[in-house]
Amino acid sequence: MQKLVDYVKGSRLELKQVTWPTRAETTRYTILVIGISIAIALFLGVLDFAFTSILEVLL
């Protein structure tokens, strides 16, 4: 049981040393990730459409 208590205490100490991002940073990074995800989805959608069109012409 003492090992568990020591583990929890150590974990809490480590969490206090973490430099957490600000709300603005978190918002900015979230928007960036969403934007990149949409861009990649659009790119892959265009590639899929192009390859499908090419295959329809060939077949």
Image (spheres, helix red, strand yellow):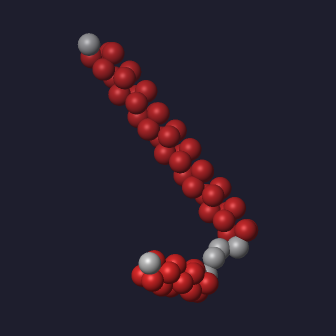
Q: Is residue 57 left or right of residue 22?
A: left
Q: Depth check: 32 or 8 in front?
A: 8
**22 in relation to 10, above or below:** above
**5 in relation to 26, above or below:** below
Residue 22 placement (x, y as % from top left):
70, 73
Q: At 43% across and 27% down in the image, what residue appears?
A: 49
- Total number of numbered discs in the rendering: 0
Residue 7 placement (x, y as % from top left):
46, 80
Q: Is residue 12 left or right of residue 4?
A: right
Q: Quick one: which residue is furthest to the right in this view?
A: 24
Q: At 37% across and 23% down in the image, what residue appears?
A: 52
**30 in relation to 20, above or below:** above
Q: Depth check: 16 or 44 in front?
A: 16
Q: Quick one: which residue is furthest to the front in this view?
A: 1
Q: Quick one: which residue is furthest to the top in this view?
A: 59
**Quarter that holds the N terminus:** bottom left
Residue 21 placement (x, y as % from top left):
65, 74
**24 in relation to 3, above or below:** above
Does any portion of residue 7 appear in the rendered image?
no
**Quarter that holds the C terminus:** top left
Residue 43 placement (x, y as % from top left):
47, 40
Q: At 32% across and 15% down in the image, what residue appears?
A: 57
**Quarter where residue 50 is shown:** top left
Does any portion of residue 23 appear in the rendered image?
yes
